[in-house]
Amino acid sequence: MSHAASIEISNVTKTYPPRGDSAGWKALDRATFSVSPGEFVCILGPSGCGKSTLLNILSGLDDQYEGLAAIHGRSVGQGAVRRPSVGPRTAYVFQEPRLMPWRTVRANIEFALAASNFKPSEWRGRIDNCLALVELSQFSEFYPLQLSGGMQQRAAIARAFSIEPDVLLMDEPFSALDELTARRLRQQLLTIWEKFRSTVLFVTHNAFEATFLSDRILMMTKGPGGKFCDEVELSDLSRPRSYEDVRVFEKSRFVVERLVSHIGQIDVE
Ligand SMILES: Nc1ncnc2c1ncn2[C@@H]1O[C@H](COP(=O)(O)OP(=O)(O)O)[C@@H](O)[C@H]1O
Ligand SMILES: [Mg+2]
């Protein structure tokens, strides 16, 4: 195992147990890849190929798997002790914001900071800084239901960055938003990432989004036994990237062609 890797996945197999009359379902079959520190990697694959399963394993939410999943050389799940005060910090942003509706935006972020053992004296500064980065400074005392879906998702992103994560896991965080809002949030995400340089593993089924955001795309085929089938390097696409840049469009067309050559069809956006 390369000690320089921020995320290491080696021969990870996940089988969901049988339930009722249905047989067990193999969601991942010997998945293997690694991500370097500070790298922005997208996993691109059709619905049901095992993307969320993989992030659940990496975040420690699911510890029933075979193989090795490690962050900064420490294995996750499988009896590994989670001690948020030491070692690498991981943040997870989901498709829905998952804010606690009875807490204000500020109190939601405080909850995350407390869970990661940050001193209360640091909270205000961290929260104000992260809310400013997602342009929500005026909304810190609002409750989630008083905000639009896009604003809630920005609050979730602020919460994720407030703990200065070494590793940020993102599961289709923009796919429930309208395309114009999603575009602004992608751009904001890249601006923040360039400040923090967290390692990002971003899951999507949108080839253009993957091309616009990442340094490298890992492609997955459909289940059962979702597999990593291909990889596209994007480091030659200079940053900051723009939606008007024809090279981004051309590259994303190339990515779609590659994906189709593996899976035969693609989700209609
Ligand atoms: N808790 C579960 N129990 C049984 N099967 C599951 C469970 N979660 C996901 N699956 C199955 O595993 C496969 C991969 O799911 P998932 O990781 O959510 O895919 P993706 O995020 O790529 O859409 C799907 O076929 C799904 O039905
Ligand atoms: Mg999913």
Image: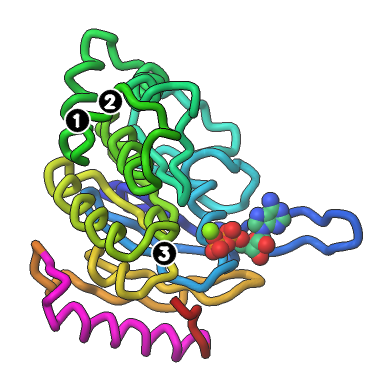
In terms of sequence position, does the residue under pointer 3 or pointer 1 come before the other? Answer: 1
What residue is at 47 percent from the left and 41 percent from the top?
59
Identify the amino acid type marked 3. Answer: Thr
Q: Are marks 3 and 2 in contact (CB under 8 Å)?
A: no
Return the residue found at the far right: 21
Name the disc covering residue 204, or none: 3
Image coordinates of residue 86 in percent, x first then y, are 35, 22
Q: Are marks 1 and 2 in contact (CB under 8 Å)?
A: yes
- Above or below, 104 relative to 182: above
Please state which of the two labelled residues, at mark 3 or mark 1, is closer to the viewer.
Answer: 1
Q: Is residue 26 visible?
A: yes
Q: Does dot 3 land on a helix, a strand or a loop?
A: strand
Image coordinates of residue 71 in percent, x first then y, are 38, 42
Give the residue pinned by disc 2. 140
Residue 243 falls inside the magenta stretch: yes
Identify the amino acid type marked 2. Answer: Ser
For the record, the magenta segment spans: 241-263
